[in-house]
Image (tube, rainbow, N blue to C red):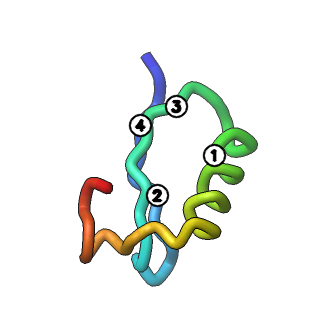
């Protein structure tokens, strides 16, 4: 079984729900990608 989490910024302007099987080094690039892509805040899109 892998891990699952909801990761948000301190301001909770963006959140990411994910399942993974790895450490922080596999998650940080994904968070950076989401930031660069301008993904919507959870208040605008809670599953997108």
**In this figure, which residue is indicated by the disc labeled 3?**
20
Does dot 2 land on a helix, a strand or a loop?
Answer: strand
Which residue is drawn at the image coordinates 43% and 71% (left, top)? 14
Q: Residue at x 26, y 66 (%)?
A: 45
Q: Earlier in the sequence, mark 3 or mark 1?
A: 3
Distance between mark 2 and mark 4 Cα atoms: 10 Å
| Mark earlier in primary sequence (2, 3) | 2
Q: Is residue 46 left or right of residue 17?
A: left
Residue at mark 4: 4
Q: Which mark is residue 7?
A: 2
Of the two numbered discs 4 and 1 on the same chain, state the one appearing first in sequence: 4
Few, some or many C-alpha atoms within 10 Å of disc 2 (few <14, some 14-19, many ≥20)? Answer: some
Name the side, left or right, on which 33 lies relative to 19. right
Badge 3: how crowded within 10 Å, few (<14), some, or many (20+)?
few
* Pointer 2 with pointer 3, Cβ within 8 A: no
Q: Position of residue 42 (x, y in %)?
A: 31, 69
Q: Which residue is mark 1?
A: 27
Question: How far apart in space, not on screen, are marks 4 and 3 (Cα)?
Answer: 6 Å
């Amino acid at each position: 079984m892998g891990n699952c989490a909801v990761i948000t910024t301190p301001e909770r302007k963006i959140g990411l729900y994910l399942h993974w099987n790895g450490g922080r080094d596999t998650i940080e690039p994904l968070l950076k990608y989401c930031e660069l892509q301008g993904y919507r805040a959870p208040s605008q899109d809670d599953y997108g």
